[in-house]
Image: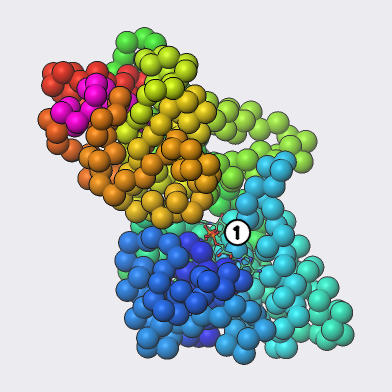
Amino acid sequence: MKLTIIGTGYVGLVTGACFAEMGNSVTCIDIDKNKIEGLKKGILPIHEPGLESVVVNNYKNGRLKFCTSLKDPLAESKVYFIAVGTPPGEDGSADLQYVLAVAREIGQCINDYVMVVDKSTVPVGTADKVKAAIQDELKKRGVKVAFDVVSNPEFLKEGAAVEDFMRPDRVVIGTDSEAARRLMRELYAPFMRNHDRLLFMGVRDAEMTKYAGNAMLATKISFMNEIANLCERLGVDVENVRQGIGSDSRIGYSFIYPGAGYGGSCFPKDVKALIRTAKDNNYEPKVLNAVEARNEAQKHVLFEKVSRRFGANLKGFTFGLWGLAFKPGTDDMREASAVVLLTALIEAGAKVKAYDPVAMPVAKRDLPRTWFDNGGLKLVDEQYDALEATDAMILMTEWKPFRHPDFERIKKILKNPIIFDGRNQYDPAMLRGHGFEYSGIGR
Ligand SMILES: NC(=O)c1ccc[n+]([C@@H]2O[C@H](COP(=O)([O-])OP(=O)(O)OC[C@H]3O[C@@H](n4cnc5c(N)ncnc54)[C@H](O)[C@@H]3O)[C@@H](O)[C@H]2O)c1
């Protein structure tokens, strides 16, 4: 089938590449010309395990194409996926300007029946707005063209996006059109060879499902962080508690790791957007408010520990930071807890030497220039170099090479044998046995 994907970011590029891998003819569009030129040369704009070979191979065999405009003849197709960003607006609501701009462009181009699929995470009611925007453009052109708008929220995880897309737990499809239902079933059939995991529902149900899913996961994290902070005050080992409750099959082990708060481009903005939706509907979202508040506070817990240990004024101190990405497996630093910590440390006068296995080009591009120019932040190319002659080590992202490092070497190169562990990766008893001062989340 011929498909067009609009927005070539984490979701759009993975969606396009995976559909091309299954034999479809896919055109990925992005308004960012550098991104598209890079992709044509085999340069990926994001780090995502396994993605590069799928993109490069399918580009070479002609099933995957790239262009910068829906008006390009390459972009013509029967199915249009909208995968542009939906960042938080000032009031927390999802900013739909990019989605609706794309809808208008689609309305300006189409001449025969098309199916428009919302893959971006969008609030309940957005499909109706997309429909109205397309309709409006058709009216301006004085033409009548049949089309369907389908909601197909994406559930992939950064760091395992290709794997998730190829073997989804489920594919949620919101539509009331029989034609769209048939097309979507055909499109996803190659991903369902083992057994059917398509969940058909109403358009608004599908839109809500995505938010409810992310809000549930965020709730588990914030809940556990609250328990961890309480454990610390009670002298209870939160890691034992985590295993104790995770073993209950009704609870499970996933998403109950205590840590320095959740970040990324999805949970923070989606929880905020759902809160906004609730408020716009005169409903006070007490649980969601608490989830969001706990997370905001949690992002400061490690800094509070550092300043309790070294003082509020950190002038003259240098810290070695391991991890910048919001989680392992990705170079995405949007809303990363490491950025909140860096801001607080630098504002308190500290210097930081940081290392991340993949996110450093993004850090160089996106972090404030003044941090680098004033010597507040230095990025180094090797993980132990980040710790050399610093006052303490801080772990913020649980990349595999950080999980079992050479602690003897760390002890030798740090000025003080102090570790702040923002992801509870290390065994405090073991480290204390080796003469380290240890401080984690909830312990
Ligand atoms: N990143 C994730 O893990 C993830 C997972 C599930 C759902 N989502 C949702 O998917 C959507 C996209 O997220 P993302 O992380 O891929 O975003 P992203 O920022 O990585 O990519 C969005 C892309 O859209 C492009 N764009 C914007 N306006 C455009 C236009 N008019 N025409 C063509 N391209 C345009 C941008 O240049 C950018 O490259 C969001 O709604 C997000 O919430 C993201």
Q: What SS does tag 1 mark?
A: loop
> Would residue 32 be found to the left or right of residue 63 on screen?
right
- 65 inside magenta stretch: no
Q: Is residue 206 above or below residue 409?
A: below
* Residue 229 screen position, x and y as percent: 42, 19
Q: Residue 191's image quarter?
A: bottom left
Give the residue pinned by disc 1.
85
Q: Is ligand 1 within 8 Å of the beta carbon of the residue shown at mark 1?
A: yes
* Residue 241 screen position, x and y as percent: 31, 23
- The C terminus sits in image quarter: top left
Can residue 230 be seen in this snapshot?
no
* Residue 183 screen position, x and y as percent: 55, 78
| Relative depth, front residue between 362 and 221 | 362
| Relative depth, front residue between 209 and 380 | 380
Can residue 399 be seen in this snapshot?
yes
Residue found at x 51% / y 60%: 154
10 Å neighbourhood of mark 1: few (<14), some, or many (≥20)? many
Q: Residue 308's image quarter?
A: top left
> Would residue 253 be found to the left or right of residue 272 on screen?
left
Q: Is residue 81 above or below residue 396?
A: below
> Would residue 144 be found to the left or right of residue 288 on screen?
right
Range of residues picked out in magenta? 410-424
Residue found at x 39% / y 76%: 42
| Relative depth, front residue between 360 and 235 | 360
Residue found at x 61% / y 71%: 31
Give the residue type at disc 1: Gly
Count the numbered circles shown: 1
- 423 inside magenta stretch: yes
